[in-house]
Image: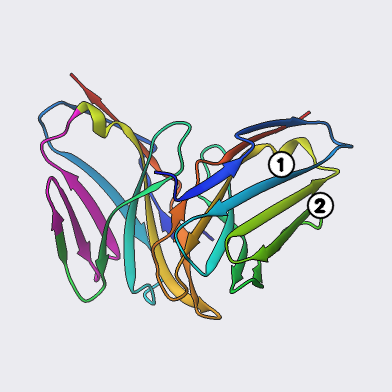
Amino acid sequence: DQQVKQNSPSLSVQEGRISILNCDYTNSMFDYFLWYKKYPAEGPTFLISISSIKDKNEDGRFTVFLNKSAKHLSLHIVPSQPGDSAVYFCAARGGEIQGAQKLVFGQGTRLTINP
Amino acid sequence: ETGVTQTPRHLVMGMTNKKSLKCEQHLGHNAMYWYKQSAKKPLELMFVYNFKEQTENNSVPSRFSPECPNSSHLFLHLHTLQPEDSALYLCASSQVGSGRRYFGPGTRLTVT
């Protein structure tokens, strides 16, 4: 059973507009959420995170929103730039592996920014 | 970013071969991980090492054998793999207790 889902495998947005990437989760014990960005031939890189005690976290053009009652989080990118074209992974932290917390990843959304 | 390096970057092997993937982290972290990424699937955690001790084997077949000689190096030994094992294998590191992972660039493995 997939605990973290990104239901849109791809998204296409015009440069300068807002990109909204969505993520749903099922486990109410998740306490921390992260977004990673992945370019081809590179590993995922951390983008932004949010604790379950908050509903919003902002870093420059990137904002993550958390709706705990709906078990939903979203990543907003505004304005979108061509360099934002990548695969975005949502991840949730929950449970302990002897001190190294377990991350559960979604399957990713490929974002394409069109000039 | 050269915090986590992986070699080789690409590997093609037959089902009867034995090969090893290598990962090295230069971040002073004390936890290391192997993940598998298959097309259109979430990243799957394979193994976790905390302070050089394996703490998680996520139901991984025995044809994958990890080794962590010290907190900076991690290996994945491969033998008698199947074509369905073809995937991107990612190494990551973190501080124990941190939710944030630092990933290497991955090894693209093709089993023929």
Residue plotted at (17% across, 30% down): A81
Residue A24 against residue A17 in the figure, above or below = below
Cβ–Cβ below 8 Å for labels 2 and 1? yes
Image position of B96 (left or right of B33): left
A34 or B108, which lies in front? Answer: B108
Residue plotted at (68% across, 37% down): B86
Image position of B7 (left or right of B28): right
Label 1: state its secondary structure. Answer: helix
Residue B4 against residue B27 in the figure, above or below = above
Task: Give coordinates of residue B38: x percent, y percent.
Answer: 58, 41
Task: Give coordinates of residue A92: x percent, y percent.
Answer: 39, 64
Q: Is residue B31 visible?
A: yes
Image position of B75 (left or right of B2): right
Q: Residue furthest right?
A: B16
Q: Is residue A111 visible?
A: no
Q: Which label belongs to residue B85?
A: 1
What kind of residue is marked 1?
Asp
Label 2: state its secondary structure. Answer: loop
Residue plotted at (43% across, 73% down): A94
- Quarter assignment of residue B6: top right
The 10 Å Cα crowd at callout 1, few under 14, some 14 to 19, many 20 or more, is: some
What is the chain letter for disc 1? B
Answer yes or no: are tags 2 and 1 on the same subunit. Answer: yes
Q: How far apart in space, not on screen, are marks 2 and 1 (Cα)?
A: 10 Å
Residue plotted at (60% across, 50% down): B23
Q: Which residue is mark 2?
A: B63
Task: Give coordinates of residue B87: x percent, y percent.
Answer: 63, 39
Residue A78 shown in magenta: yes
Residue B57 shown in magenta: no
Q: Residue furthest top?
A: A115
Image position of A62 (left or right of A44): left
Range of the magenta residues?
A58-81
